Image: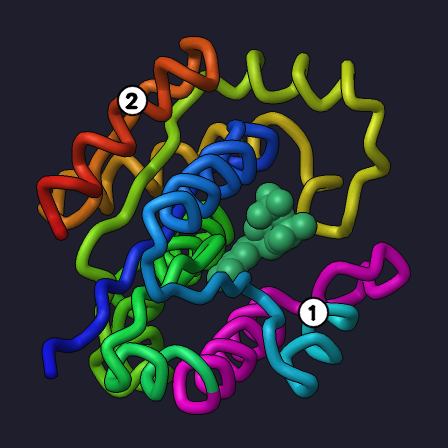
């Protein structure tokens, strides 16, 4: 049996990634595909506890290295417990964020080093990589305006501000220049037009 397709979505906070994720999910469901959806950090009982530690704004004394290891710990758990078994059954896995988030947020923006992030990513996943990654790219100002409209409360990561998000975006663009599996999709268009591009790449990767 063929391994399932592993698809991940990435982007700065407020980029519209979750909307695209939902649209691809609906598309797969309407085509009767065998798939599961997961998110990072979280997606397992242990991972959801780690998520709470990572995102709770009260944990503002968390050190960057602690943050890095917690993201990787949650990833190791979901990879072995959920993602790898599903792929081995032939099921497609849609994952809202995966290890490119660590590359961009902790490796690049937190300045822990992108090579360090890549090494730990490899360790946490046992070398498992997505087949296709959609990086939904928008300027930070557009993302911040969108978030303002939604009026959502910031979590600990979102509370880091605009210049941090600028660095995260640069980190993603650097990752995209290194890894051909990452498709940079301009997220400034309407959700429907952005999805046309996502759908095209998905169909090409199937
Ligand atoms: P979440 O509410 O899932 O955000 P979003 O809806 O934007 O995906 O929060 C996850 C936050 O954690 C988000 O700010 C990105 C950050 N993050 C990292 O810094 N490193 C990582 O490895 C992952 C997976 C997420």
Count residues near mark 2 (Cα–Cα under 10 Å), then give few for <14, some for 14-19, many for 20+.
few
Magenta span: 54-81
Q: Main secondary structure of the magenta part?
A: helix
66 within the magenta span: yes
User: Compared with residue 9, is residue 90 higher up or lower down, i.e. above or below?
Assistant: below
> Residues under labels 1 and 2: Cα distance?
32 Å
Identify the mark at residue 196; answer none if there is no mark: 2
User: Compared with residue 145, is residue 90 higher up or lower down, i.e. above or below?
Assistant: below
Q: Which residue is mark 1?
A: 51
Count residues near mark 1 (Cα–Cα under 10 Å), then give few for <14, some for 14-19, many for 20+.
some
User: Compared with residue 190, is residue 65 higher up or lower down, i.e. above or below?
Assistant: below
Q: Residue at x 50, y 87 (%)?
A: 77
Counting from the top left corner in percent of width and height, residue 156 is at 76, 51
Q: Residue at x 27, y 48 (%)?
A: 133
Left-right relation of 197 to 138? left
- The answer, for residue 80, to whether it is visible in the render is yes
- The answer, for residue 168, to whether it is visible in the render is no
Along the line of sight, the residue nearer the viewer: 60 or 86 = 86
Counting from the top left corner in percent of width and height, residue 62 is at 73, 68
Task: Answer yes or no: disc 2 within 8 Å of ligand 1.
Answer: no
Counting from the top left corner in percent of width and height, residue 116 is at 31, 70
Task: Answer yes or no: disc 1 within 8 Å of ligand 1.
Answer: yes
Q: Residue at x 41, y 33 (%)?
A: 169
From the image, state whether disc 1 or disc 2 is nearer to you. 2
């Amino acid at each position: 049996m063929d391994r399932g397709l592993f698809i991940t979505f990435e982007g700065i906070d407020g980029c519209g990634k979750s909307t695209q994720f939902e649209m691809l999910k609906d598309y797969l469901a309407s085509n009767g595909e065998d798939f599961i959806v997961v998110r990072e950090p979280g997606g397992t009982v242990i991972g959801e506890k780690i998520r709470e530690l990572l995102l709770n704004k009260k944990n503002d004394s968390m050190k960057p290295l602690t943050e890095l290891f917690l993201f990787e710990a949650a990833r190791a758990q979901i990879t072995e417990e959920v993602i790898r078994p599903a792929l081995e059954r032939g099921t497609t896995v849609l994952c809202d964020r995966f290890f490119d988030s660590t590359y961009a947020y902790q490796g690049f923006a937190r300045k822990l080093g992108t090579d360090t992030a890549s090494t730990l990513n490899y360790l946490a996943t046992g070398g498992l990589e997505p087949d296709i990654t959609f990086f939904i790219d928008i300027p930070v100002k557009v993302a911040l305006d969108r978030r303002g409209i939604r009026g959502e409360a910031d979590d600990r990561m979102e509370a880091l501000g605009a210049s941090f998000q600028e660095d995260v975006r640069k980190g993603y663009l650097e990752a995209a220049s290194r890894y051909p599996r990452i498709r940079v999709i301009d997220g400034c268009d309407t959700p429907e037009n952005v999805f046309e591009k996502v759908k095209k790449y998905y169909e090409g990767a199937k």
